[in-house]
């Protein structure tokens, strides 16, 4: 019988990626929407703090182990911005087009060599809401910011994130290739490796 865990996210793109990567495991990933778990205010100052806030709320609402990630884009020319505010960079939570426009405006005068950036993912698993020793995993994906969006796949900043080793944007990668390379994919592989060694 599969072990059930709740995914602490209402982001359809993120849920789709995580669900696809974990589909071969002996666990059933249940969206938090099944438990009337609403998005919580992300008041942390770091990715890991925000991931823990989301996981704890989902575990409390569901009574299940909870998996949550907090991810974002760090741009060196912007001193690490948009960082933990990546989804809210332009003010409206989850407005990808507005966020991308604001990022391009902020980098308008920055040449290619100054547009280095990386995606960060902090993934946490709480076995229950009061878990004092959460599982924590980090994935980092290096790249640079393009001058114009490219590609139709992915979500968020994917059309602007140039993957040097592939010569294209993240949004131009097939989903399975993106999952092998991405920050979220790296963190999920670490989670799966630990899950193979330890039970929830």
Image (cartoon, helix red, strand yellow):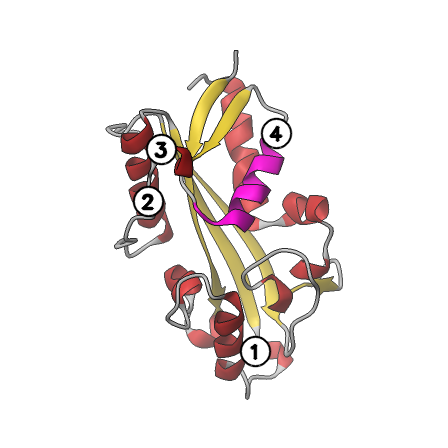
Q: Earlier in the sequence, mark 4 or mark 3?
A: 4
Q: Is residue 159 left or right of residue 33?
A: right
197 relative to 125, above or below: above
Q: Which residue is at a point 56% across and 64% down the rendered structure image?
A: 157
Residue 132: x, y in percent?
25, 29
Of circles 1 and 4, which is in front?
4
Residue 13 located within the stretch drawn in magenta:
yes
Distance of mark 1 from mark 2, alpha carbons?
39 Å
State which quadrant residue 173 falls in: bottom right
Residue 104 in view (yes/no): yes
Of circles 1 and 3, which is in front?
3
Marks 4 and 2 close (CB-CB < 8 Å): no
Dot 1 alpha-carbon crowd within 10 angstroms: few under 14, some 14 to 19, many 20 or more: some
Local secondary structure at mark 2 = loop
Query: Which mark, residue 114?
Result: 1
Residue 65: x, y in percent?
37, 26
Distance of mark 1 from mark 4, alpha carbons?
39 Å
- Which residue bears the numbered disc 2? 38
Residue 181: x, y in percent?
65, 48
Residue 21 located within the stretch drawn in magenta:
yes
Question: Where does the magenta region start and end?
Answer: 10-23
- Which residue bears the numbered disc 4? 23
- Which residue bears the numbered disc 3? 35
43 relative to 66, above or below: below
The overriding secondary structure of the stretch rendered in magenta is helix
Marks 1 and 2 close (CB-CB < 8 Å): no
Q: Is residue 33 left or right of residue 156?
A: left
Local secondary structure at mark 4 = loop
Residue 54: x, y in percent?
33, 43
């Amino acid at each position: 019988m599969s072990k059930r865990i709740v995914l602490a996210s209402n982001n359809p793109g993120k849920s789709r990626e995580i669900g696809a990567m974990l589909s071969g495991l002996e666990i059933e990933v249940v969206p938090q929407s099944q438990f009337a778990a609403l998005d919580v205010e992300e008041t942390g100052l770091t990715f890991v703090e925000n991931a823990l806030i989301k996981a704890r709320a989902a575990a409390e609402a569901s009574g299940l182990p909870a998996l949550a990630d907090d991810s974002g884009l760090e741009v060196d020319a912007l001193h690490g911005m948009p960082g933990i505010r990546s989804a809210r960079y332009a003010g409206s939570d989850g407005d990808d087009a507005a966020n991308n426009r604001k990022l391009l405006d902020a980098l308008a005068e920055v040449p290619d060599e100054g547009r280095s950036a990386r995606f960060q993912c902090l993934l946490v698993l709480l076995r229950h809401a009061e878990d004092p020793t959460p599982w924590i995993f980090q994935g980092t994906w290096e790249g640079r910011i393009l001058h114009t969006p490219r590609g139709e796949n992915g979500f968020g900043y994917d059309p602007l994130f140039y993957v040097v080793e592939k010569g294209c944007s993240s949004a131009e990668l097939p989903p399975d290739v993106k999952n092998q390379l991405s920050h979220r994919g790296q963190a999920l592989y670490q989670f799966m490796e630990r899950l193979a060694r330890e039970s929830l």
